Image: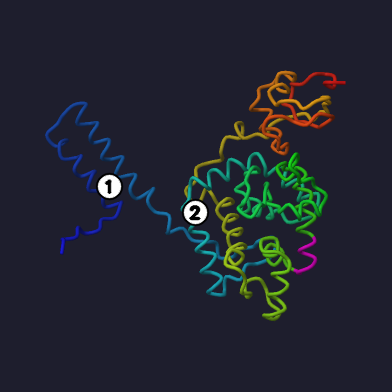
Amino acid sequence: MTARLPKIGLAALFSALAALLCLPSCSMEGADGGRVADIAASLEQLAPRDLRKTDFVMPGVVVLCGEIVPLDRPAVYERLEAEFLLAVNHPAQVELWRRRALRYFPLIEESLRKAGLPDDLKYLAVAESDLRPEVFSPAGAAGLWQFMPSTARHFGLTVSKEVDQRMLPEPLLGIGMRYLSQLRARFGSWALAMAAYNSGEARVSGALKNQGPGDYYQLALPAETERYVYRIAAIKLVMEGAGGYGFKGAPAAGLYRPKAYVEVTRNYPEPVAWLRIAKDEGCDYKTLRLLNPHLQAREELKGGPFAIRLPAGAGRPKTVGT
């Protein structure tokens, strides 16, 4: 058998390193000794502050979409705490959520307000796509709200080889609001509506039929769906309480403002390459592609009239090709 070294926690390791760094400073004077002492002090300060994330506690009352999460049930408390600790201990992801929220939350919040829906539904978009409209799931869902092609077409969006409107936040927002409203009307609670959004209406209806009446927190559902509402609630807790969980200040809004654009109609009689359009419109190729993720053609677009988004300030005053 080989001897095993004792396990040492990271905080203890930092303290030991700090102590070692201090040894030479006892016999050193001047700038070098001061530098070593500064490093040791920095390590001592770093260890206890930045290496603890498990002592954060959830609020005593958690409300999601106006509905109280029943934390008095031990199983519910345990599951929400697990999702909360997973989120709060992933600081890079939380910071990315906070930055992307500067770009997308104003748009989502306005849409929810106009539709008379709970503001908390914006956290569903975070759970679905991490606020990345370009994301595709392995099952084929796409966009900020991760709609399947059949659902998107049912609500009037175009999903084809040439155009996939799921990639644009604005049209997807409208159908997201309508679909969530329908689910809430059908199932009677936002928790069940969100579960149906994740796993499908038939799955939740079947669970209610086979398992008897109950709320989301009592149903046996697919593993992903059983996590789903808890994860949305945890995202809300961490994003709304970020300052109390070790996240510093608000991210700078300037770099994450929505990209300004104008939408114009262009008419090319023959297939046209993206690079040609960029040159015609006086903008760069990459910006043009980023503004038009819904146009699926890799190399060139079909001839004929089509709508295209251009950077604000770019574009010819007249329709090209007519």
* Position above or below: 264 against 130: above
Question: Who is closer to the viewer here, 204 or 299?
Answer: 299
Q: Is residue 245 magenta?
A: no
- Closer-to-camera residue (147/295): 295
Crowdedness near tag 2: few (<14), some (14–19) or many (≥20) residues, C-alpha within 10 Å: many
Please tell me which residue is depicted at 18% across the width and 26% down the height of the picture: 30
Image height check: is 70 above or below 20? below
Dot 1 crowding, Cα within 10 Å, few <14, some 14–19, many 20+: some
How many labels sit on residues? 2
* Mark-to-mark CA distance, 1 and 2: 23 Å
Q: Which mark is residue 88?
A: 2
Magenta stretch, main secondary structure, is helix
Q: Which mark is residue 58?
A: none
Quarter of the picture containing the C terminus is top right
Q: Residue at x 73, y 52 (%)?
A: 149
Q: Using the rendered view, name the quadrant where residue 189 is placed.
A: bottom right
Please give the residue where the numbered disc 1 appears in the rendered image. Answer: 14
Q: Earlier in the sequence, mark 1 or mark 2?
A: 1
Q: Residue at x 72, y 47 (%)?
A: 109
117 shown above or below 163: below
Task: Report the side of 176 relative to 74 (left or right).
Answer: right
Element carrying mark 2: helix
x and y percentages locating residue 148 in the rendered image: 71, 54
The quadrant of the picture occupied by the N terminus is bottom left
